[in-house]
Amino acid sequence: MSSNKQNVTFTEDELTQFRDLFQTYDKNKDGRVDAQELHALTKSLGEPATAEELDFVVKSFDANHDGALDYQEFLNLMTTLRSVGRE
Ligand SMILES: [Ca+2]
Ligand SMILES: [Ca+2]
């Protein structure tokens, strides 16, 4: 349990979309996306990340240090991606 609240301002549509994404790319259905699964995801977003980038991303957002991102950690990642995504 975490009381660590962020200013998440996703709409319900977005949350549904992210949950779908999460479930789609959690290929082995263990409730977490690891670096490999994330790679498929970034590819589908049109910006495939390198192994180094994915490693960095997982480490940065893996709050409980189990080596993969659970849904909450994944949402934090999406929050960050959305705020930095535009170039
Ligand atoms: Ca998984
Ligand atoms: Ca984790």
Image (spheres, helix red, strand yellow):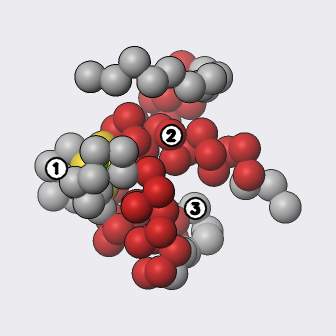
Helix, strand or loop at mark 3: loop
Residue count near mark 2 (Cα–Cα under 10 Å), binned few <14, some 14–19, many ≥20:
some
Quarter of the image where one finds residue 63: top left
Residue count near mark 3 (Cα–Cα under 10 Å), binned few <14, some 14–19, many ≥20:
few
Q: Does the residue labelled 1 lie within 8 Å of ligand 1?
A: yes
**What residue do we see at 42% from left, 44% from top?**
74
| C-alpha span from label 2 to label 3 | 17 Å
Residue count near mark 1 (Cα–Cα under 10 Å), binned few <14, some 14–19, many ≥20:
few
| C-alpha span from label 1 to label 2 | 20 Å
Quarter of the image where one finds residue 83: top right
- Tell which tag, 2 or 3, sits nearer the viewer: 2
Tell me the kind of residue under disc 3.
Leu
Q: Mark 1 points at which residue?
A: 29
> Which quadrant of the figure contains the N terminus?
top left
Q: Does the residue labelled 2 lie within 8 Å of ligand 2?
A: no
Helix, strand or loop at mark 1: loop
Q: Position of residue 43 (x, y in %)?
A: 51, 70
Q: Name the residue under label 2.
A: 76
Tell me the kind of residue under disc 2.
Asn
Q: Which residue lies furthest to the right in this view?
A: 87
**What residue do we see at 50% from left, 40% from top?**
76
- Tell which tag, 1 or 2, sits nearer the viewer: 2
Residue 45 - label: 3
- In primary-sequence order, the first of circles 2 and 3 is 3
**What residue do we see at 28% from left, 45% from top?**
64
Q: Is mark 3 within 8 Å of ligand 1?
A: no
Helix, strand or loop at mark 2: helix
In the image, taking residue 40 as reference, residue 33 lies left or right, namely: left
- In primary-sequence order, the first of circles 3 and 1 is 1
> Which quadrant of the figure contains the C terminus?
bottom right
- In primary-sequence order, the first of circles 1 and 2 is 1
Q: Position of residue 56 (x, y in %)?
A: 47, 69
